[in-house]
Amino acid sequence: MGTPERIRAVAERVKRTHDEGASTAVVVSAMSGETNRLFELASQVSSAPLTREMDVLVSTGEQVTTALLSMALHDLGVPALSLQGHQVRIATDSAHGRARIRAIDKSRIEEAFDAGKVVVIAGFQGIDDQQNITTLGRGGSDTTAVAIAAALGADCEIYTDVDGVYTTDPRICSDARKLARVSHEEMLEMASLGAKVLQTRSVECALRFSVPVHVRSSFDDKGELSGTWVVPEEASMEEVLVSGIPADKNQAKITMQGVPDIPGLAGRIFGSLADDGVVVDMIVQNVSVDGDRTDLTFTVGKTDLDKAKKIVEDIREEIGANNVVASDSVGKVSVVGLGMRSHAGVAADMFKVLAAEGINIQMISTSEIKISVIVELDQVDRAVNVLHKKFFADREGTDSGTNA
Ligand code: ASP
Ligand code: MG
């Protein structure tokens, strides 16, 4: 929703769906750049803006677009009704800036449907049980859209500035290609591993309520075949081993060396980090050979590095660990695919390919459908390219063949 022209184009698109006879709810985000502008504005009047007031401020971007889209629809002869988060009653917890949706009251939406209206709902915002306005975190309109679809038992189409979900970041690997379909589980791994197409929480919500999500570009309209369908596993019809190779360059690594090998210390360290809101990703602890001391390494987001280091330094002193080393020149490269559940050997293939390139693996972690490694930051691009070649070379140009 970059410009007034774009808003009119969105209205045309909504009108087509409405004309087909479907009850239509549209969730809007703010005009592009607007949410950033509001954050910036706050920083000019306060060094530490109150989180409650931040939400009052940044939720206004979506109020503007609900009204504009609704007006544009009226001009096209489509009766529309704008609704803010509190008017629908999108009930959230009270975690300002990253609130979670608890429940959605669909009665007002259904009333509007019964009256033949299109409902235009403000994304990103909700209301807590004290009637405070809350927001869902950056990119939160995706989550609003999926949650509304779940509440209404509808499919969800997300129009965004990319034309779908890719096997890897096209800026890193020119062979990256669009996936026609991907399962919720895989998308969740890809979303949280740095593929910034959908807000991670929206995918969690889609998985939980089995909402099919069609991600597509707001700039083209090639119909059902465009974009990527993010669907329940049964519908993803996967014959493929690997669906994607997400990379994350915003990682940092902290190692505490010589941690006394006694019960409770990991709980202590990660408890303190969690209390201060530091999200820890990979954790690796060595087996202590002499049964005495061990090394503990973990990763955090780059922006949390200083905070995490300080916390860990303080604990090191208390517990008498040897020392703490940190590095922010690391990145994470992963291989994701449902097929890994039933096929052995993907990890070995991945490690061999990296070894052949002389890329050293610093940490490894795995889940049922994912293998992630930490490597030197300046080797991330090369790692992605060789892995993409390994796992996708034989599938060039088979976008709808192998994956759909
Ligand atoms: N306007 C909010 C943001 O910029 C929510 C969204 O666009 O999804 O993060
Ligand atoms: Mg968005």
Image: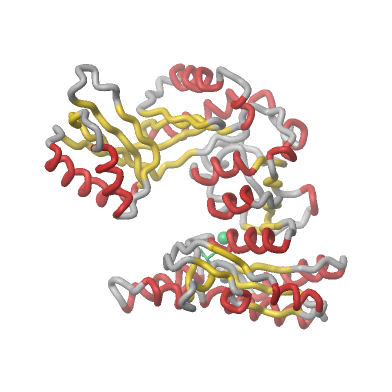
Left or right of 194, for residue 14: right
Q: Residue at x 67, y 52 (%)?
A: 215
Instruction: Judge by depth and name the residue closer to the eye, 370 or 204.
Output: 204
Q: Position of residue 197 (x, y in %)?
A: 58, 51
Q: Residue furthest front?
A: 263
Say which residue appears at 16% left-offset and 46% top-offset. 314
Pinpoint residue 11: horizontal percent, then vertical percent: 74, 72
Where residue 95 sits: x, y (%)?
A: 42, 65
> For this view, does 382 lie left or right of residue 173?
left
Looking at the image, the residue that sits furthest to the right is 20
In the rendered view, how is the structure colored? secondary structure
- Above or below — where is 360 with respect to 45? above
In the depicted structure, whether residue 356 falls above or below residue 178: above
Can residue 142 be seen in this snapshot?
yes
Classify residue 67 by image quadrant. Answer: bottom right
Residue at screen point 50% across, 18% down: 348
Residue 302 percent across, percent down from the top left: 34, 47
Asked if residue 218 can be seen in this view, the reply is no
340 horizontally vs 16: left or right: left
**Residue shown at 64% from the left, 71% from the top:** 105
Q: Is residue 317 above or below residue 15?
A: above
Q: Quadrant of residue 404?
A: top right
Identify the image quadrant of the N terminus. bottom right
Seen from the viewer's position, the closer of residues 291 and 13 is: 291
Looking at the image, residue 40 lies above or below residue 224 = below
* Total numbered labels: 0
In the foreground, 310 or 131: 131
